[in-house]
Image (cartoon, coloured by chain):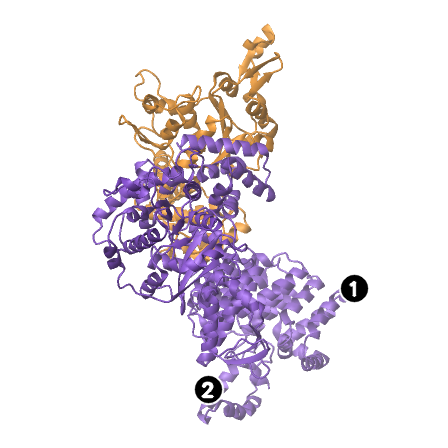
Amino acid sequence: MDCARVENGAGNGRGTAAVAGRQDGEAVALRPHAEDAFAKELAALAAADDRPRPERWRLSPWAVATYLLGGTLADGTVITPKYVGPRRIVEVAVTTLATDRALLLLGVPGTAKTWVSEHLAAAVSGDSTLLVQGTAGTPEEAIRYGWNYARLLAHGPSRDALVPSPVMRAMAEGMTARVEELTRIPADVQDTLITILSEKTLPIPELGQEVQAVRGFNLIATANDRDRGVNELSSALRRRFNTVVLPLPATPDEEVDIVTRRVDQIGRSLDLPPAPDGMAEIRRVVTVFRELRDGLTTDGRTKLKSPSGTLSTAEAISVVTNGLALATHFGDGVLRPSDVAAGILGAVVRDPAADRVVWQEYLESVVRERDGWKDFYRACREVSA
Amino acid sequence: MTTRTAEHGTERGTGERRAAGPWLLGVRHHGPGSARAVGAALAQYEPKALLIEGPPEADALVALAADEEMRPPVALLAHVADDPGRAAFWPMAEFSPEWVALRWALRRGVPVRFIDLPAAHSLAGSGSGSGPEEPSLAGPEAEAEAEAEAGEGTAPDGPAEPAGPVAGDARVDPLGVLAEAAGYDDAERWWEDVVEHRGTAASGDALAPFEALAEAMGALREEGEAGEEGGASRDAVREAHMRLRLREARREFGDDIAVVCGAWHVPALARRTTVTADRALLKGLPKAKVSVTWVPWTHRRLSRSSGYGAGIASPGWYGHLFSSPDRPIERWLTKVAGLLRGEDYAVSTAHVIEAVRLAESLAAMRGRPLAGLTETEDAVRAVLSDGSDVPASLIHDRLVVGDVLGEVPRAAPAVPLQRDIARLQRTLRLKPEAKERELELDLRKETDAARSRLLHRLRLLDIPWGAPTHSRTSTGTFRETWRLRWEPELSVRVAEAGIWGTTVLAAATARAASDAADAGALAEVTALAERCLLAELPDALPVVMRVLADRAALDADVGHLAQALPALVRSVRYGDVRGTDAAALREVAVGLVERVFVGLPPACASLDAEGAAEMRTHLDATQQAVGLLSQVTEDGGLRGRWTAVLRVLAEREAIPGLIRGRAARMLVDDGRLEDGGTGGTGGTSSAGEGDGTRGDGGAARLMGLALSPGVPPADAAAWIEGFVGGGAGGGMLLVHDERLLALLDGWLTRVPGEAFTDVLPLLRRTFSQYEPGVRRTLGELVRRGPVAAGAVGGGAAVGHGAAGGGEEAAAPGFGPGLDRDRAAAVLPTLHALLGEGPDGRDRALTTTGTDTPSGERR
């Protein structure tokens, strides 16, 4: 999960340690849930919201969209933007939740999928904790239900011996459930969702009962679209989802901004001194990443081949952080081209044959000719040779 | 029939005519909602005459619109009679209100008049300024575009027309203001919601929407005009003319007249002004003789992306809205599903249902009365295409814009392109004759060069009047021979080519740009670039180059890149011959070569025999291209980098023998193989760092390696084919470098008997290509073999012997020491050839001694 694209305005974001208003004695959560961190905004929105709300929704779809995108309410309350990106994406996502179709958020790593899903759940149901984390080992019980074996042995099968999954609870209470990294879940377990999403019911054959979803239930899944091949969704399941792709940052400045801020945060936690003159290098890394990713130079005049890697913002952040560590421990503390060159090479050349050609072409046709990039070109040639 | 629109927003409205009067139907051009409303209003009010915003010159052409063969989209084209480059278009689609009105009137036999400012004035005015006679780049829209800039308003642009960047004056955007007032961020969407998507109310007055609109426009104009001083703009003049025509029509037909014009003009037409004031505005306008005709149009050219200022972004969508009787969203998404199924996407009916639901919910959430294009696009993306952009762009291209092509009846007057060709034929004294004849052109003469250009341009336009042939008498870059023959069907081709532009130059430029965009293979684009140079289309060339560079960047196949090289390099040379600025071309060519450099080594690895043979031709093409390019560019490093690439090719094990041999040969030919200096650094270093050791010691080393006993004989034979094979000059190396011949000879005798039969065909293929003389000499050398081979073979000793010698070090393949007597014998002849005096003797001798070892031997 990465909140790279989220504006870290006052009092939000991952870095916020606790919510104001908690009692002194209470242990402070390292990272509060969205519905706690933004309780005030949610309350203000609920108060100002006079549009029709779907059943069991805390807010109207319009208010949910406003909560994510930010804005100012009639009473002057400022809603901070949680997601910086195209408005229509959020509108489609919210509208999907209002229908009975499930929502699938796709995107390369570092595009705030999890962040968006958490805030959607918080705004719609007031609870973002009904969460199933998808892994290669996620069992069916995580999606359907499990048993409390002590009770099962003592009293036999009954509703009391049943341990409901987050999805089951969401169905029963008409809430929003979340499934993270859906494509990491084995295909047979994934398919458990089909009945839930199409019939809106979860049979419990052991008891001869079923749990029927009440109105207000819906499900948000996230998946990494670069790993799509891991456990590709069956078309039966895919048909139950509306797909929304979260894009990478739209402008270089936005991305440089995100990278700088995150590098700063990470750097502080690693006790790295702030780079005095690193801005130019960060801009360069972002430029290289964007150009290769888009297959187009920033001046829009030359097309390029794109390598097989994602080259996401998150990777740019790690290249710069790495370079900073190199500069601090082995260099003179100033971020230089040679510090980032190896990192960039590693990020770009994932497939040794095809990507190397892409990288060499980029070096020879773009980097070599560019003014002020001589040092960088030399550093790159050194590590690529 | 309760109100008279004209009276709205004006203070002088008198009650007496309220029930009748000219009905001013303000529309948005190409708006399907407007078209429907106009249709309904006409049906309800049945006017006795119809006035349409358009050039009055076209009055005579109105009847053609009823022709069976006329199929929209079409455009009225007006151009200056003797200068077809100055032209303006009035496009009409099936869903244009003007078209709907026109067809209605023709069906009812109601007279139609066009009332806009005559094209005679507007074109005469615009010609002087940023006139469209300079065919600007990139498209048949060139004129339309230029027209939109120069004569803003001659085209029936939308009510948004004053919003455009009108010659630098920042007038407010009237629709934008209205949309903002309604809480919309996008004026287009607002218009769609308020007018286009609102079906005509089943009951009530068909004029009602027009009245409301006229009122809003009136309010807007009042604001706008307050700030606008001395508004004798084009609009004012046009509106004055429209009022005069309206008055005329009222005298003739009474008040039962309908006027279809841009909504922006409605308040101006309703305004009461005096005839004299209007006449005064129109006084002294420049005038030109213009011709008017109908031309076919396309949806693509209606769309804004093709540069037509007053265009619409989604003609296909509008066409759909206009033609579907009900449930437009359901019908549209069904269409989309049909398209996607045709492209092998799995789209079920359930998908369509879900997409419709999502689109409608989205519209509700966004507060729109009906789902629009944005909603359906979002829904398609989320439901039908799993978030992918590929189907979305397909849908945009095929459905939202669409491929509809209009047709015009044969009876329509000639297109301007035809006149332009006729004019050129006259000035260049080239008569179109049905009989075939040959034409010799000397490009140094101006007329001939112009003729050549015309023929090349016509060929680009698919009008193959002349076909280039090889001359029997003369060759050379300055001569061209054509075979001319004008067949009757060429006239049809000319008419077809009319959509590209109004002059040959403009049309050819537009066509070339379009061809470049559509070209499949890279080589096609380079060929096109060559044709652009021949046809001298300076404006098309940058577009083609751009496409070329893009294709080259994305093409991963080195073969394609190498194939594209020869034509490109030829173009660079032609460019120089013809004095065209070929700098851009050169840049692209160098870029292409660089890409080949990077891609060649990996592409050469692990090839089979066939692939290797093909790659060898690419290698040859690149070698030639580098040779030519390094002559014309200042980039000295090009050759050095090529040498580095060749070294890698010559030494890498995984590369087939044929390629390695070929690369080695190229290095030898370029004199880039120093002794032993062939480390695998792969860098661009050491190119031509002449340290005195010249010659082919490296070649011997490479050959020795390739022909080592451990190498499979078939590989070795392939290497030999690459190294000394290939027609002219291939064998001469062996004739002159006996050391290499000895190595070859030695290898051949070592080939085991069973392998010999495998090797034989390869060797035969290699040696049979030599000229008979070379073959005989080689045979003699081999027969004499043991002596020569023994003497030289010792010196070669695979590696270092040659370089390690003293001052009189032997040139590789030659005996040690300089035989001064024998060398002196050739000096007189050399002096005679070089024209040097006797004092140059010593210099000549040293030169001969060190640099041209072959001379010494002779």
Residue B263 percent across, percent down from the top left:
34, 46
The one nearer the camera, B181 or B206, is B206
Q: Is residue A32 visible?
A: no
Furthest-right residue in this view: B754
Q: Residue B33: x, y in percent?
A: 43, 41
- Which secondary structure lies at badge 2? helix
Q: Which amino acid does label 2 sit on?
A: Arg
Q: Can residue B60 be seen in this view?
A: yes
Marked residue nearer the N-terminal end (1 or 2): 1
The disc labelled 1 sits on which kind of residue?
Answer: Glu
Determine the CA span between mark 1 and mark 2.
55 Å
Q: In which quarter of the image is residue B340?
A: top right
Q: Residue B754 carries which label?
A: 1
Residue B843 numbered tag:
2
Q: Quadrant of residue A80?
A: top left
The mark found on residue B42 in the picture is none
Question: Does the CB distance between marks 1 and 2 fall below 8 Å?
Answer: no
**Chain A rendering hue:** orange
Chain B: give its colour: purple
Q: Residue B283 appears at what percent x and percent y?
A: 26, 62
